[in-house]
Amino acid sequence: MMCQLGQKCVMEVVLLTILSWMSVWAEEKIIFDRHAVYWNSSNPNMDQIKMICGPQCPGWSIDLQNCKSVQPTGFKLRFWHGEYRVAVNINDYLDIYCPYYEGPPSHGRMERYILFMVNHEGYTTCQHRMRGFKRWECNRPSGADGPLRFSEKFQLFTPFSLGFEFRPGHEYYYISSPHPNHVGRACLKLKVYVRPPDGSGYDSPEPFLTDGGASSRTGCLALVAASGLVFLGLYLWL
């Protein structure tokens, strides 16, 4: 009896190891893009972007690589005030770069923001208290390690309790509130559209944030259940 239990334990460990390596291998094979947003009030508007990049670079605010060769000296890619929209695919990353100052500007001129994920109403009114939650905080504008960067991965499922799950064909909204010590600054807003795999379908606005993160918990439970079925199938097959 003990021998059989020992064999089962060894088999389970081997299966877990194999699945772990398969997961790592699959993750490396996933194709994704990274979209950079410099979150500060001095980013140029879209008309300026088109004048600088021309027709060869329609996605200047999305794809940094395409515009490095045409970027004028001293011109930095930064967040622009107004309608800012980024289109992503599932498994893409959104990199948010916080304001950063290499020189010694006055303390009051340094921009600090608290970023929130909100629903459509919160986006249009720029009110984070309307069914929104805090996502990140840009609070080190002159840190020794350079600008703060926060990354959002657009995934269907997440194993993390603080993660968020995204659905293709929907829009998601980010806004910033000035740091409590820097009230009166402009509201910065970002709209992210998750493309469907086949390029069809469009649902907007996305009615999320209904109960403080139930979507993430539900997806996590679904992922655990699916993993259990995989383990069971492999165990019975062997």
Image (spheres, grey):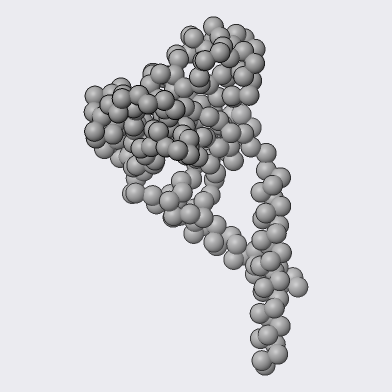
Q: Is residue 213 left or right of residue 227?
A: left
Q: Is residue 170 above or below residue 157?
A: above
Image quarter of the C terminus: bottom right
Q: Residue at x 49, y 59 (%)?
A: 221
User: Looking at the picture, how far across and down is residue 25, in whole percent?
Assistant: 71, 52
Disc tally is 0
Q: Is residue 62 left or right of residue 141?
A: right
- Which of the pair 20/186 is nearer the observer? 186
Q: Residue at x 52, y 15 (%)?
A: 74
Could you say which quadrant of the image residue 73 lies in? top right
- Which of the pair 1/29 is nearer the observer? 29
Q: Is residue 161 visible?
A: yes
User: Looking at the picture, how far across and down is residue 9, in whole percent?
Assistant: 66, 79
User: Looking at the picture, how far across and down is residue 38, in whole percent?
Assistant: 47, 27
Q: Residue at x 26, y 29 (%)?
A: 182
Could you say which quadrant of the image residue 81 lies in? top left
Q: Is residue 204 visible?
A: no
